[in-house]
Image (cartoon, rainbow, N blue to C red):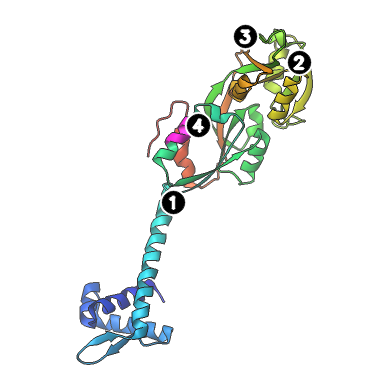
Amino acid sequence: MNRRQLEYFLAVARELNFTKAAESLYVSQTAVTQQIRVLEEQLGVKLFERTKRKVELTPAGRVFQSEAIGIINRIDAAVQRTKEVSSGFVGTLNFGFTIGIGNTEISDRIQAFNRKYPNISMRFYNLSPFMLLKQLKEGELDLAVMPMFQEKYYSGISLKRVARDHYVAILPKNHVLAQNLYITWEDLREAPLILATTPDSEIGEDQNIVENFIRRGYQANVTDRIEDVETIMFMVSANMGVTILPAYMAIPAASRGKIATVPIGMSENQVEIIAAWMPEVENPSLKKILPFLEENPTPGE
């Protein structure tokens, strides 16, 4: 059974006349008659009662007419949806991000994207930068937004710089520097640092911070490296050390009574935020969202 047979059957069922059905399809009456005969043989039932004076649907033919209309409609809908998915207007996008990204202007860009393409469903995954890169490479994510550390760790990955931020120090509320308007790297040279990174700094999460001290002739006093930011916040509030984070990650800390957030002045080494994806990803929705993520977005079609 194929679409042509269904169309021929529906034309005859509509006209109840083989000649008129053939004319409506711009084919010969013989072609219509042959296709109906083949269809009846395939189904093992008689679809029409034919006499010299008239053509009528059999009871089985009336049931099949309803089913055939549904089949044609479903085929048309499947073709249309496939075309829409191919163009990127309908689809699904697996989007990974790191903690705090929602505090940046990127959330406004996602909102604009969602308004323009409401039929692209987005699935969000909040993971550490290391896990985001891992899942990108494994094909679990289409796109990830995260801070970029050492560029060498992103070999083979396509990326676009989408924002930037500065570092802040997060201190216990009673710390001697907690009331300053800003502090310097030198002010923190002896502070016990709890840095947000995987234990082995698998993608260089802490290297930018450490290098800021080294360039000024100091050795960073790193006492712990912990991947979970919420654990670090708890340790800082318990006066077990201080931490340094991009400002967007520290925004929620400002509302905590036992923690102070102070900008680090003279920080020429800003944090770059990137959108990253694997070059072989063929999801057409990816091409639709990328223009929205640029620092000065000019979204197109």
Residue that badge 4 annotates: 107
Residue that badge 1 annotates: 86
Instruction: From the viewer's perspective, tell me whether residue 129 is left or right of residue 41.
Output: right
Residue 254 placement: quadrant: top right
Q: Under tag 2, what secondary structure? A: loop
> Mark 1 or mark 4: which is in front?
4
Residue that badge 3 annotates: 182
**Sequence order check, earlier mark of 1 and 4:** 1
Label 4 amino acid? Ser
Label 1 amino acid? Ser
Mark 2 to mark 3: distance in Å? 19 Å
* Residue 261 visible in the current orientation: yes
Say which quadrant the C terminus sits in: top left
Mark 4 to mark 3: distance in Å? 27 Å
**Which x, y percent locates residue 235?**
75, 23
**Which x, y percent locates residue 63?**
37, 79
Residue 82 placement: quadrant: bottom left
- Residue at the (21%, 81%) spot, across then down: 19
Q: Which residues are magenta?
A: 107-112
Label 2 amino acid? Ala
* Residue 246 visible in the current orientation: no
> Mark 2 or mark 3: which is in front?
3
Label 3 amino acid? Tyr
Residue that badge 2 annotates: 220
Q: Under tag 1, what secondary structure? A: helix
**Which x, y percent locates residue 56?**
27, 85
Q: Under tag 4, what secondary structure? A: helix
Above or below, 145 relative to 280: above
Mark 4 to mark 2: distance in Å? 34 Å
